[in-house]
Image: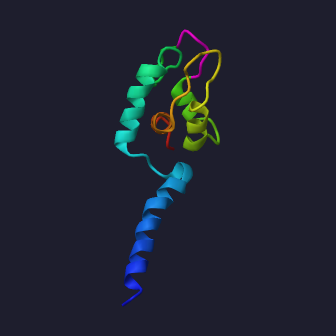
């Protein structure tokens, strides 16, 4: 039985890595989405409509549900974008953990169906 341990370790590693590389098909954890929503309320709501409500924003920044439903958009793309400054705003970039949580929240607004 010398191969049982290496096989078990391989299965555990695959179970850990596959959701990370799975792209948009991997479902984010609820805690991540909730954290992203809190961050959006704190950092993004001045310019973006962060929850589908029908209310417009005072800027022309797209609503988060509009962003989520753009064809081809992925959580990875959103996270990369959120990590960089955007538009004419200072301090809009977020560190990777926050950017991932914000991307998970935005993607949770995608219409399924």
* 70 shown above or below 76: above
User: What main secondary structure does the magenta stretch of the protein show?
Assistant: loop
Picture residue at 40% right of the left edge, 68% below the top: 12
Of the 4 image quadrants, the one containing the N terminus is bottom left
Magenta-highlighted residues: 57-62
Picture residue at 34% right of the left edge, 40% below the top: 31
Count how many numbered circles sit on residues in the image.
0
The colour scheme is: rainbow
3 on left or right of 71? left
Does 107 lie within the magenta span? no
Picture residue at 40% right of the left edge, 29% below the top: 37
Does 59 lie within the magenta span? yes
60 on left or right of 38? right
**Of the pair 109 and 84, the residue shown nearer to us:** 84
Picture residue at 61% right of the left edge, 40% below the top: 77
Q: Position of residue 22 (x, y in %)?
A: 53, 55
Q: Position of residue 89 (x, y in %)?
A: 60, 15
Residue furthest out toward the top = 58
Q: Position of residue 27 (x, y in %)?
A: 44, 49
* 97 shown above or below 4: above
Q: Position of residue 91 (x, y in %)?
A: 55, 20
**Of the pair 58 and 96, the residue shown nearer to us:** 96
The answer to which image quadrant residue 32 occupies is: top left
């Amino acid at each position: 039985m010398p191969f049982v341990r290496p096989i078990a370790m391989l299965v555990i590693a695959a179970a850990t890595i596959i959701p990370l590389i799975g792209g948009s098909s991997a479902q984010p954890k609820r805690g991540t989405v909730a954290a992203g929503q809190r961050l959006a309320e704190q950092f993004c709501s001045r310019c973006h409509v962060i929850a589908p409500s029908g209310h417009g924003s005072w800027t022309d920044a797209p609503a988060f549900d509009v962003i989520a439903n753009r064809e081809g958009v992925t959580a990875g793309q959103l996270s990369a974008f959120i990590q960089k400054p955007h538009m004419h705003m200072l301090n809009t970039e977020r560190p990777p953990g926050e950017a991932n949580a914000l991307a998970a929240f935005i993607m949770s607004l995608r219409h399924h169906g």
